[in-house]
Image (tube, rainbow, N blue to C red):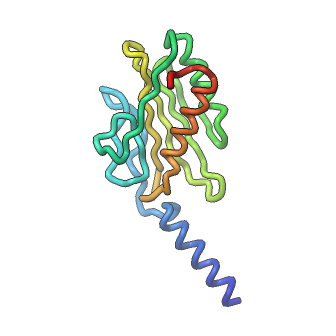
Amino acid sequence: MLHVNGLLSRVLLIVAIAGGISPKPIEAAGMEPSGLKDCPGSPNCVFSEAADPEQRVDPFRLKGDSAKIWPAVLRVVAAMPRTAVITHTDHYIQAECKSRIFRFVDELELFLKPESGTVSVRSASQSGYYDFGVNRHRVEYLRQALLAAGLIEH
């Protein structure tokens, strides 16, 4: 019984560190007048326009006419594992991504800038502090899927 209790204590500690037990969630996802919200001060968010260089990722640069490519980008996002598109418009996609084991929910957002042919991308945990690089990995996974589909430039 002692071994089981010790294992349970370790699992609960890992859950707490990863963010599964948190008194308050980070700011909700959504739009600012100029585009997507910046990341909070916690290291569980990446954003193509982040003020903090540690949280910055490269935006996506579309290949061709954004009006024709944007629906295909939406299909690639919707096909990602454990991802559900919550809302989308002709310039914005919001999706929820669940972690495999603990079912933590992260927000994935894309904002199309047709005038420049770029897409701002933001991925952030809804709760907790650390994400062990999960959000950065998600954005890079999406980048590779969009590259493979021929929708963005390298």
Which residue ends up furthest to the left in the rendered image?
A: 51
| Quadrant into which the N terminus falls | bottom right
Image position of 116 with respect to 129: above or below:
above
Q: How many marks?
A: 0
For the point 58% across and 43% down, which residue is it? 97
**In screen coordinates, is 41 left or right of 78?**
left
Q: Position of residue 91 (x, y in %)?
A: 46, 20
Q: Residue furthest front?
A: 154
Considering every residue shown, the one lying at the far bottom of the view is 2
Q: Is residue 55 left or right of residue 97?
A: left
Query: Which residue is at 58% across, 27% downward?
Result: 146
Query: Which x, y percent locates residue 138?
Result: 54, 42
Residue situated in front as seen by the camera: 14 or 142: 142
Location of residue 90 with respect to 132 vertically, above or below: above
The structure residue drawn at horizontal position 51% and vertical position 28%, both measured from the top left corner, is: 93
Q: Is residue 25 left or right of residue 148?
A: left
Percent across and percent down for residue 31 are 38, 31
* Figure check: 14 above or below 61: below
* Residue 94 in picture, x, y percent from top left: 51, 33
In the image, what residue occupies the spot 57% across and 38% down?
141
Spot the residue most to the right.
Answer: 1
Q: Nearer the viewer, residue 106 or 45?
A: 45
Looking at the image, is 120 positioned above or below residue 103?
A: above
